[in-house]
Image (cartoon, rainbow, N blue to C red):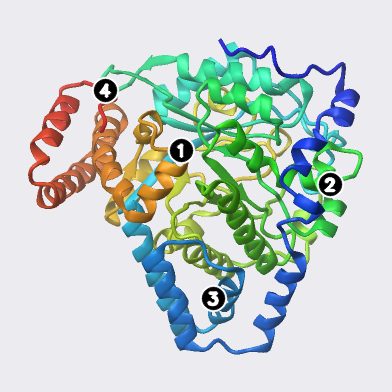
């Protein structure tokens, strides 16, 4: 059990709202009161985009820098890519480079995960969100640990997920102690797979939650948290204030933007950035994301493990998702993914089931690396609906766009030559933070992960796949094994030994 003795207690929601943020833990990372999100610099970059046509030679220099160094670009370089993205020929060069970088860093893997919403209790009043405290239409609840076990039985035992993103509203009822207990509950549950009967379970629990103090983050580290996601929603300080009332915890812009600095200080060194595209000018948001990544690198020499790209979607009790002047179309969304891959070349890029199937299919060769499927974001939605594509607006934060099952998605990806990875080995072997940053930039991590992807894909095919999906998956694995034999001939017998053991029913073998 986690030792939570060092974290603060709060009398009620009002006490929590007033006293949760720790001012000293903000000021430490804003020396002289100067914020690393330099809005003047961002706005200057945006003005220059409008004033000039992109010079193809200069654009190609930036693309080459991204491919060869795999270092985070300067905002001015990202702005140059933005200016070029409206030129179809230049954009195709950018897209092809983004795909090459993705393959060099991550190979042809697509990492699979599932969202698991733990609670929709929330003290905040975000104007675009179905979970906000003033929305009387939302049916409120937090999962008990017994209910959480029922959710895991479906996610791990019927669908076959190994990796979760656990999502929590901000509320004293579901603060650090609850998060820690739920992580331990997820890891502790084992169930039998439907086809093979093998014992299966969740091996990686990432968390999407509110910003926490350093002491609380150390508690989560002690129970094996994976990546810690906090979405900024918008980096535009004025708009942030309009969307997030000043009376709320989330209304504290500086507390939220310094969250990942505290994560690194606490030893939670895999962090996931994201904004809610459609709230503000997408150019501002992506340039600010680059500045955020660069500041983390400046302080800790570690950048974001992932970037996420949620778009505004309809939600209960709000018209903001329909009425925002900054909504983006699918073509713009595709440009954003490509520019992000070139701007932060080493990072994982997540495109969730908020997007519809056509949009996600389109950006698979634009540099993305992770997606979810068979997703249900209602509280207790998996066990209540037996993994059907069922949505209820009053039980969800927003509505999903892509409701394909995991079997459909695995089959589709395999048909495009992409292997679905359920691997979590790197995190348990210590390949996190600065270690994984170096491995990603040099391409070493992709090689480890390819082998482990084959092993976990074999597991999933034998434990969960339909006959049709297994057939196409088997063909892809044969191709992958031949590739491993070609570029690792001396190590291949060891790989084959682990693969054959997996075929015999052994589980969770990895390098």
- Residue 287's disc is none
Where residue 100 appears, as percent x and y from the top left, is 34, 65
In the picture, the disc for residue 244 is 2
Find out whether the residues at labels 4 and 2 contact each other: C-beta distance under 8 Å: no
Residue located beneath label 4 in the image: 507
Above or below: residue 466 compared with residue 33: above
Q: Residues within 10 Å of mark 3 (few under 14, many from 20)?
A: many
Please tell me which of labels 1 and 2 falls first in the chain. Answer: 1
Viewer-nearest residue: 1 or 171? 1
The residue identified by callout 3 is 81
- Determine whether, in the image, residue 243 is placed left or right of residue 345: right
Is 258 rendered above or below residue 204?
Answer: below
Q: Which residue is mark 1?
A: 113
Helix, strand or loop at mark 2 = loop
Q: Residue at x 69, y 66 (%)?
A: 284
Residue 503: percent from left, percent from top: 16, 27
Q: Are marks 1 and 2 in contact (CB under 8 Å)?
A: no
Instruction: Say left or right for 31 vs 17.
Output: left
Between discs 1 and 4, the one toward the N terminus:
1
In x, y percent, where is residue 80?
A: 57, 78
As measured in the structure, the alpha-carbon distance from the residue carrying label 1 to the one carrying label 4 is 18 Å
Mark 1 or 2: in front is 2
Relative placement, left or right, of 337 versus 42 is left
């Amino acid at each position: 059990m986690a030792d939570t003795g060092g974290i603060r207690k709060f009398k009620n929601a009002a006490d929590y709202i007033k006293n949760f943020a720790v001012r000293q833990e903000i000021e430490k990372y804003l020396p002289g009161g100067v914020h690393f999100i330099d809005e003047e610099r961002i706005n200057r970059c945006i003005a220059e985009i409008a004033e000039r046509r992109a010079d193809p030679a200069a654009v190609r220099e930036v693309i080459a820098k991204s491919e060869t160094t795999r270092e985070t670009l300067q905002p001015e370089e990202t702005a140059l890519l933005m200016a070029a993205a409206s030129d179809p020929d230049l954009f195709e060069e950018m897209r092809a480079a983004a795909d090459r970088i993705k393959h060099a860093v991550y190979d042809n893997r697509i990492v699979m995960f599932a969202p698991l919403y733990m609670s929709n209790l929330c003290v905040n009043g975000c104007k675009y969100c179905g979970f906000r405290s003033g929305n009387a239409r939302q049916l409120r609840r937090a999962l008990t640990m017994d209910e959480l076990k029922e959710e895991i039985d479906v996610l791990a035992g019927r669908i076959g997920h190994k990796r979760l993103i656990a999502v929590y509203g901000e509320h004293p009822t579901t603060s650090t102690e609850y998060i820690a207990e739920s992580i331990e509950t997820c890891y502790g549950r084992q169930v039998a797979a439907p086809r093979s009967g093998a014992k299966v379970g969740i091996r990686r629990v990432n968390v999407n939650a509110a910003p926490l103090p350093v002491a609380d983050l150390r508690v989560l580290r002690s129970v094996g948290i994976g990546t810690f996601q906090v979405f900024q929603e918008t980096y535009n300080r004025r708009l942030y204030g309009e969307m997030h009332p000043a009376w709320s915890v989330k209304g504290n812009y500086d507390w939220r933007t310094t969250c990942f600095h505290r994560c690194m200080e606490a030893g939670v060194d895999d962090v996931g950035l994201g904004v809610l595209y459609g709230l503000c000018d997408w150019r501002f948001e992506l340039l600010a994301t680059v500045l955020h990544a660069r500041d983390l690198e400046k302080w800790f020499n570690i950048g974001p493990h992932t970037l996420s790209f949620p778009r505004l979607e309809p939600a209960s009790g709000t018209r903001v998702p329909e009425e925002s002047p900054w909504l983006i179309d699918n073509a713009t969304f595709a440009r954003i993914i490509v520019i992000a891959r070139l701007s932060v070349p080493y990072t994982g890029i997540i495109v969730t089931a908020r997007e519809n199937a056509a949009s996600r299919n389109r950006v698979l060769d634009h540099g993305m690396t992770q997606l979810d499927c068979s997703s249900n974001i209602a509280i207790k939605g998996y066990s209540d609906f037996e993994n059907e594509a069922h949505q209820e607006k009053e039980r969800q934060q927003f509505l999903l766009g892509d409701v394909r099952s995991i079997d459909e998605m695995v089959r589709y990806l395999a048909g495009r030559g992409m292997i679905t990875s359920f691997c979590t080995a790197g995190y348990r072997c210590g390949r996190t933070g600065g270690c994984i940053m170096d491995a990603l930039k040099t391409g070493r991590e992709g090689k480890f992960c390819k082998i482990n992807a084959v092993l976990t894909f074999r597991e999933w095919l034998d434990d969960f796949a339909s006959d049709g999906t297994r057939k196409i998956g088997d063909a892809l694995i044969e191709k992958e094994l031949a590739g491993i034999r070609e570029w690792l001939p001396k190590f291949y017998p060891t790989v084959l030994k682990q693969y054959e053991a997996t075929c015999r029913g052994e589980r969770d073998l990895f390098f």
